[in-house]
Image (cartoon, helix red, strand yellow):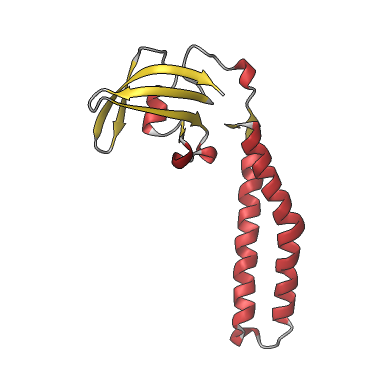
């Protein structure tokens, strides 16, 4: 079971609807048009249309599976005194004295450029359940990071 923010759940549902209602019908039309051009063994257009159809079907199934096994998390029931899903956490890397802020999200919402890390990442997992002032140790490829939690907020 995965938990998603309402925004991400709606984005996935919207993309799925777009694929099913708009993209897939166009793909099947393109495939039928390519198939009507004759010999399929020598028809590059047909092969490309089949590839696009398979890719579209794969994406539809993937999104359906995400929605089937996901629930929207209610931010009102999340703790505010410790790190949890959807927490924005400011912490200090004690070895470099560098402050960073990240929002803890599900793996489907991860976006480092937007400051969102997965709760399943080494840093996200180490921060989960911790309180302000606590030190978390994250095992990363370069070694162990010691992170002191400075603040926790919910957006």
Q: Residue at x 23, y 33 (%)?
A: 143
Residue 154, given in percent of the width and then of the height, sits at 54, 21
Q: Is residue 101 left or right of residue 139?
A: right
Q: Quadrant of the C terminus?
A: top right
Q: Is residue 63 left or right of residue 140?
A: right
Residue 103, given in percent of the width and then of the height, sits at 48, 29
Q: Quadrant of the N terminus?
A: top right
Q: Residue at x 60, y 76 (%)?
A: 47
Query: Above or below — where is 125 with respect to 109?
Result: above
Q: Is residue 120 left or right of residue 32?
A: left
Query: Above or below — where is 38 with respect to 135?
Result: below
Any part of residue 68 in sight: no
Q: Residue at x 37, y 18 (%)?
A: 149
Residue 91 falls in image quadrant = top left
Residue 85, given in percent of the width and then of the height, sits at 52, 25
Any part of residue 152 in sight: yes
Residue 90, given in percent of the width and then of the height, sits at 41, 23
Q: Residue at x 63, y 71 (%)?
A: 50
């Amino acid at each position: 079971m995965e938990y998603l923010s309402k925004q991400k759940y709606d984005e996935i549902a919207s993309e799925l609807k777009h694929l099913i209602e708009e993209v897939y019908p166009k793909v099947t039309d393109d495939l039928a048009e390519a198939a009507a051009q004759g010999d399929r063994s020598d028809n590059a257009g047909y092969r490309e249309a089949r590839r696009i159809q398979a890719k579209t079907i794969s994406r539809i199934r993937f999104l359906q599976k995400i929605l089937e096994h996901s629930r929207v998390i209610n931010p009102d029931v999340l703790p505010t005194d410790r790190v949890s899903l959807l927490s924005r956490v400011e912490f200090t890397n004690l070895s470099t004295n560098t402050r960073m802020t990240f929002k803890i999200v599900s793996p489907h919402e991860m976006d480092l450029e937007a400051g969102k890390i997965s709760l399943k990442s080494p840093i996200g997992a180490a921060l989960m359940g911790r309180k302000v002032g606590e030190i978390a140790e994250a095992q990363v490829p370069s070694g162990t990071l010691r992170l002191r939690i400075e603040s926790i907020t919910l957006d």
